[in-house]
Image (spheres, rainbow, N blue to C red):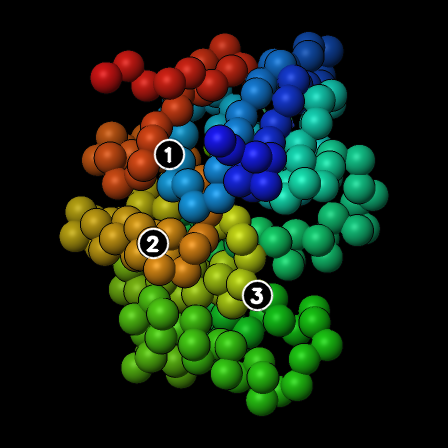
Amino acid sequence: MSTSNDILVRCRGVTKQYKKGETLVTPLESLDLDVPRGDFLAMMGPSGSGKTTLLNLLSGIDQPTSGTIEFDGMEIQDLPRRKLAGWRARHVGYIFQLYHLVPVLTAFENVELPLLLDDMSRRDRRERVEAALSLVGLADRVHHYPRELSGGQEQRVAIARALVADPALLVADEPTGDLDREAADAILGLLQTLVREQHKTVVMVTHDPRAADAAMRILHLEKGRLQEAAV
Ligand SMILES: Nc1ncnc2c1ncn2[C@@H]1O[C@H](COP(=O)(O)OP(=O)(O)O)[C@@H](O)[C@H]1O
Ligand SMILES: [Mg+2]
């Protein structure tokens, strides 16, 4: 029997509306979602169907118009914005399609960034950063700048940055969208390893059915709700 403790993220009746000039857009409408701990969930859906909006709500970057989002048993939808930033830094790692590394910082310095918010000794920070870069297979690229890395390596640095504060949840928005097949497969294999060996929970948005196949389950976002993929 599953208890609420097995569920890392629980969305109930989540609606998100945006005003676009005079019109109201409703990308998410009364959406329910349970993400169990240790899940690797792929979310698919046409462009504009609300995939990024949903990732932003799960990760506390944005807040729903109505409904509840429980993360590890705590409702986050009403946290004040200034608290959300600190909460997010500890609980969620965000991985983007275009990596979003800071070009003038080395791999080490990029991965170190999220830890600078914390009160941590330099030495502890260095250990955490080196461990995260080892985990993604880049122990030998610590002092390289983003321009000296391949796209796949840049995405690994971005994953190390997402991991370094040891969050329970990793959200990834089209993480392989800009990579060739070989680099994409390596990134997907890495995400699988993080779920299996580091007990991470991953929610990944993708257009690519091959990427979605790397996940444990696939949901489709349609008309503001999530549907099981037809097999
Ligand atoms: N900050 C925003 N302000 C206004 N409209 C937005 C905003 N973010 C997203 N939208 C609208 O919400 C809908 C869903 O967008 P998005 O979540 O980015 O879709 P997807 O990631 O599936 O392509 C789109 O119609 C988009 O234009
Ligand atoms: Mg999007």
Give the quadrant of residue 155.
bottom left
Q: Is residue 66 visible?
A: yes
Residue farthest along the bottom direction in this orientation: 123
Q: Is residue 157 left or right of residue 122?
A: left
Q: Position of residue 122 (x, y in %)?
A: 62, 87
Q: Is residue 55 visible?
A: no
Q: Is mark 1 within 8 Å of ligand 1?
A: no
Assign a secondary structure to mark 1: strand
What residue is rendered at 72% in x and 41% in y?
74
Question: Which residue has dot 2 on it?
Answer: 196
Assign a secondary structure to mark 2: helix
Question: Which residue has dot 1 on it?
Answer: 42
Q: Residues within 10 Å of mark 3 (few under 14, many from 20)?
A: many
Q: Residues within 10 Å of mark 1 (few under 14, many from 20)?
A: many
Q: Position of residue 63 (x, y in %)?
A: 71, 33
Q: Nearer the viewer, residue 108 or 14?
A: 14
